[in-house]
Amino acid sequence: MTPSPELLAASGARSGDAPVPPIPTGGGWRIIGAKELADHLSSVRFLILTAALGLAAVASVAATSGGIREVAQGASGSPAIFLKLFTLGSSNLPALIDWIAVLGPLLGVAFGFDAVNNERTERTLPRLLSGPIWRDDVVNGKFAGALVTIALMLAAVLVVVAGVGVVQLGLVPQPEDILRLLVWYVVAVVYIGFWLALATLCSVLLRRAAFSGMAAAAAWLVTAAFSTFLVGSVADVLAPAPADATFEQQLANATMRQDLSHLFPGNVFSEATQAILDPSVRTTGLVLSTQVDRAVPSVLSFDQSLLVVWPQVVALIALTAICFGLAYVAFMRQEVRA
Amino acid sequence: MGIMAIRTEGLTKRYGAFTAVDGLDLEVRFGEVFGLLGPNGAGKTTTILMLLGLTERSAGTAEVLGLDPARHPLEVKRQVGYLPDEVGFYGDLTGRQNLRFTGRLNRLDRGEAETRIDELLERVGLSEAADKRVDTYSRGMRQRLGLADVLIKGPRIVVLDEPTAAIDPVGVAELLTLIRGLAVDHGVAVMLSSHLLPQVERVCDRVGIFVRGRMVEQGTVAELVARMPAQEVLLEIGVDGDPTATRAALAAVPGVSIHDQDRIDPRIWTVATDGDRRRELVAGLIADGLPVFHVRRVGIELDALYRRYFAQAGEGVADDAVA
């Protein structure tokens, strides 16, 4: 590395009086996001997770096809039969949407748990931040890059499954089916975004990627495995329903359980999924037997279904935004070194 | 001549009760190399981070290119190249890809960036390794890649944090020549921090001795040396004889005190003298029948000065511990 005038010329070094180069004002997150996306798409973890999700999709569709034939024969003109491709499980295998409810958090955690702490252990953060970008560009770009990766992966799986449905089973989607599927897709991405944000938060707070990954995975396990139990115990304390409870007490207990369960994004997502993908679902709330007495079974139009799950959708967006907000603030308050 | 490259007044950074940087006054001009010298933990990196707007200052003012880095971080960071201490790169990308990413962050035109990357990689001697993943690079290679990374944006100010720490002596010499060229031929302001004074003293126009958050001395090397008391000259002497006799003979020369006996080669002694007493020392030893095979003046004057301030800092720490 013999220094020479050419190097200095090549470096573009200017004298003190040279004109100031154009100063970028924003958009740094896009540059970082694009790099993250490129990194993820060529990573081993992307391959593994795509394989896992793809396998789940193929298996569940294969298992579902028999069930769909029965449904179709049993009720020709059954509404939204195309969507059954995604919602109908078999005795051995859960439906595709259940797979995604389970694997979605895993995707979020997998693409987020080492987002920031990896920059620290690799010592790239000071160099990155010494570029002409704002500090929040880093956390925004990381989140955006990972979320786009996940969205691409999910879209690919859905398209493949839909294609199998059309070609193999001759199920032709109605425009409304496609609309429902699209809305569900957006909601699913937001839901996975929640876990991605949680994992990003862990990666900001915990310096070791291994700890961060374990913490995020533990949070997912706890909510997945114990949410019913937790909700039940807390509700029984706040609104007790003893064996000889009155109707009002029982109702209060049930309402409390439902309200509390909305604190867990998994429950909110599963309610949203039901109502969006199944037009015969008319409410996600409590239904008393007197209310459905002599009700005529019917299906809801797309906009009516959307109305039913609007609170869930908003809640999911809010949970994701809060979680990402925490990660954002935590990152902004950290020292560059440390 | 217009604005200063870097100017600070009373720059202070506190972490709770701990003051990392205490009232720093600093000026760096275009076309000069300024050495910020001090032991580890003196606050050098904290100072640099404040100058880049990467950490908030607690008090005082800072101007980089006439701009406040806390208010205009992008303008400052676009024109200041920063090589962090133990620079890191994305290990799963190649050297070239890492540089390309930096080019994008700096919004360089794609074609222009590619030409510049090729040139820089060649000049830092990484052309052959350019398309290998960085996690196969040695520390020295990373440091050289770091230098290319700093220069790719065509900076008007270059800030190097411990640039020589990870490289071999030949690499250090090449690096310093390059740094010198940046300042002299291209008017770039260079600020480098180091705890290895002898390595960087040669290229610095001015140095500041930075101890425990305070600038204790600042000026050209000659100015600082002129302020030094005369007695702090260190000599290294190799004597092939009985250690006890040698010790006695050395101590017998007026104005000489024994500083150290080398642990690995006990024939090598380090003595402190008031002024240059090589002649008297050699004459005395020979007169006592002790063969002298090596005499060397250790370090330059600045090294002694640096040693002196660091010794003071050490005592200061001890005082604090007692208090």
Image (spheres, coloured by chain):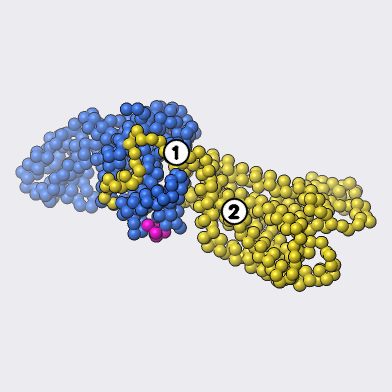
Chain colours: A yellow, B blue
Depicted B218 relative to depicted A230: above or below: above
Relative to residue A184, is residue B34 drawn left or right?
left
From the top left corner, tell me how far across and down residue A25 is, in percent. 50, 38
Magenta segment: B130-135
Placement of the C terminus of chain B among the 4 image quadrants: top left
Instruction: Tell me the residue at 83%/64% (across/down).
Output: A78
Check contact, mark 1 vs mark 2: CB within 8 A: no
- The part of the image, by quadrant, that contains residue A221 is bottom right
Question: What residue lies at 45% left-to-right and 58% top-to-bottom?
Answer: B92
Do pointers 1 and 2 mark residues of a single chain?
yes
Three-letter amino acid code at the position of disc 1: Pro
Seen from the viewer's position, the closer of residues A18 and B59 is A18
Mark 1 and mark 2: span between their CA atoms?
30 Å
At a point 52% along the width and 51% down the height, the residue shown is A34
Name the disc covering residue A46, or none: none
Residue tagged 1: A22
Give the residue at the far right of this rendering: A294
- Residue shown at 14%/41% (left/top)? B250
Q: Position of residue B241 (x, y in %)?
A: 12, 50
Which residue position is annotated with label 2? A148
